[in-house]
Image (cartoon, rainbow, N blue to C red):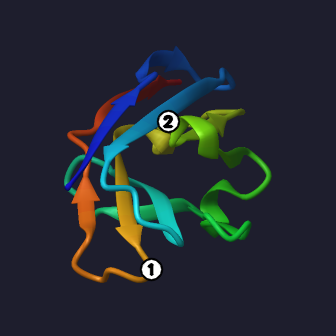
Amino acid sequence: QVHLVESGGGSVQAGDSLRLSCEASGQITRPDVMVWYRQAPGKERELVAADFSTGTTKDADSVKGRFAISRNSAKNTVYLQMNSLKPEDTGIYYCNYRSLVATDMDYWGKGTLVTVSS
C-alpha cells in the first residue's frame, strides 16, 4: 500500500501562485509515476501534470508555461508549482501514485482544494 497526503491548497486571486505538495509513504515501487489530477465543479477529473521516476514529465496543454511538476525522490514527494493562476484552475487537486512494474499499485490522495477568484 501507498499512502498519499496532499497539502498546499487555498484560496487566491487570479494571477497569484500556489505550490502543492504530495508526500507518498509505504511500498514505493519504482519505476513509478506520480500524477496531479484536478476536478472542477461539475466536470470530470482531468490530468494536470505527471512526473515519472525515470525523469520524464508531462503537462496538460491548459497549464503549459504556468504550472511545473517536480519531484524530490529522497522525500518521496512531488510538487506542483502553479503560477499565473486563473479562475478556471479552481478545483480539487488529487495526487495519484502508480507503479510502472506492479500494475495493481494505483493509489489516490484525498485531494486539496484550490480556489481562484477573479
* Front of the two marks 1 and 2: 1
- Would residue 21 be found to the left or right of residue 27 on screen? right
**Observer-nearest of 97 and 69:** 97
Helix, strand or loop status at disc 1: loop
Task: Tell me what residue is drawn at x 49 percent, y 42 percent.
Answer: 89
Gap between marks 1 and 2 measured at Cα: 34 Å
Which percent across, then down, holds residue 1?
A: 19, 56
Q: Residue 82 occupies which quadrant of the picture?
A: top right
Q: Which residue is tagged 1?
A: 100
For the residue carrying disc 1, how many other residues have a C-alpha within 10 Å: few (<14), some (14-19), or many (20+)? Answer: some
Helix, strand or loop status at disc 2: helix
Three-letter amino acid code at disc 1? Answer: Leu
Task: Tell me what residue is drawn at x 59 percent, y 27 percent.
Answer: 19
Q: Earlier in the sequence, mark 1 or mark 2?
A: 2
Kindly check if marks 1 and 2 are in contact, taking CB atoms under 8 A apart as contact. Answer: no
Which percent across, then down, holds residue 75?
A: 55, 35
> Taking the image as drawn, is residue 33 in sight?
yes
Three-letter amino acid code at disc 2? Answer: Pro
Q: Residue 84 occupies which quadrant of the picture?
A: top right
Task: Tell me what residue is drawn at x 71 percent, y 47 percent.
Answer: 68
Can you tell which mark lies on residue 6?
A: none
- Would residue 80 be found to the left or right of residue 46 on screen? right
Which percent across, then down, holds residue 47?
A: 45, 65
